Image (cartoon, rainbow, N blue to C red):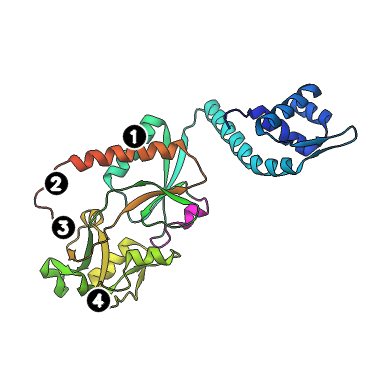
Amino acid sequence: MHQVHVQEIECLLVLAEELHFGRTAERLGCAQSRVSQLVAGLERRVGVRLVDRTSRRVALSRHGVQFVAEVRPAYRALSAAVDRARDRARSGTLDRLRIGFHGGLYGEVTEAFRRLRGEHGVVLELVEIPLGSPFTALLEDRVDAAVVELPVGEPGLTTGFRFPPQDRLLAVSARHPLAAAGRVDVEELAALDVLRPLGDAPDYWRAARVPPATPGGVPIRSGTGISTVEEGLALVAAGDHGMLVCRPLAERAAREDVRYLGIDGLDEPSQLGLVRRTDRPSWQLDALAGLLAEVFGRAAERPVPVGAAVP
């Protein structure tokens, strides 16, 4: 690929539209002989005839039709990127990224966001996405990436950075009989109505949030759906519901009417990921992933505070 010149690609794409060497030369602002040279050079590099030309007509070969169809979207994307960079340089505006999230963001994440702007000139637009729809905004191109809970198995999506795994805790009302114990066995989840996220998330993602059964095979009831973490905590505080949360969320959402309990026997931790489109290369997202790795690497070296309120 490094041997193919952009000018040759551009020339072939214009020729594919005009099917005339003279009109192609006019559009490109060069001599007709230069058009012939560019097309011939591209054919040598690719190793196949792309254009059939006679004294009466010009047409793409079978290989040329396929090559143009495959290369045109990439050329348009490259041209658009160059235009955006030129516009930014003229106007002095900064690069922007739209990042989706649900629930909340760690302090380490916001630190990485601040550094992304300060060190790379990238401004972030944060978009809260529904708790039970982790991938829709990304697939519909309403955000460039999303900080959401894993796993992700959707075609076309990939995880650019995996956050450190976190313990999963059970949130219950401070008045619930289980609250005094401080910890519960995973089998005791079957006695609760465990809140589930509402949305269009795939089944495998829902099962990772609320297991359908305990390790012993007892079904876990999940008859009540929630749209936000705040809604879930309100239901937990007011009744007999339980909600599975990660430790950082529990530490941020401490309240007198809710207790967070450790769960013995629940082996699957909670883990966030920076999820992005596989077909959208982005140096900005690469830079953000690198900053997240640095920030969380430092966080792992910090001493754990003594006397934490969450078990």
Given the current orientation, which residue lies at the most extreme right position?
56
| Side of 153 relative to 88 (left or right) | left
Residue type, numbered disc 2: Val
Residue type, numbered disc 3: Val
| Side of 124 relative to 222 (left or right) | right
- Against 297, residue 141 (above or below) is below
Q: Please say whether residue 133 is one of the residues in the magenta stretch.
A: yes
Tag nearer the camera, 4 or 3 = 4
Residue 295 placement: quadrant: top left
- Against 165, residue 205 (above or below) is below
What's the residue at 35%, 62% (across, down)? 228
Point out which mark residue 190 bears.
Answer: 4
* Secondary element at image label 3: loop
Quadrant (top left, top right, bottom left, bottom right) of the C terminus: bottom left
Residue type, numbered disc 4: Ala
Tag nearer the camera, 3 or 2 = 2
* Nearer to the camera, 286 or 174: 286
Cα gap from disc 1 to disc 4, whole angstroms? 44 Å
Magenta part, dominant SS: loop
First in sequence: mark 3 vs mark 2: 2
What's the residue at 71%, 32% (across, down)? 43
Q: Please say whether residue 242 is one of the residues in the magenta stretch.
A: no
Point out which mark residue 115 bears.
Answer: 1
The picture places residue 222, in percent across and down from the top left corner, at 33, 74
First in sequence: mark 2 vs mark 1: 1
Q: Which residues are magenta?
A: 131-142
* Secondary element at image label 4: helix
Cα gap from disc 2 to disc 1, whole angstroms? 24 Å
Point out which mark residue 129 bears.
Answer: none
Q: Give the crowd class for mark 1: few <14, some 14-19, many >=20 residues within 10 Å.
A: some
Q: Which residue is disc 3 drawn over?
A: 310
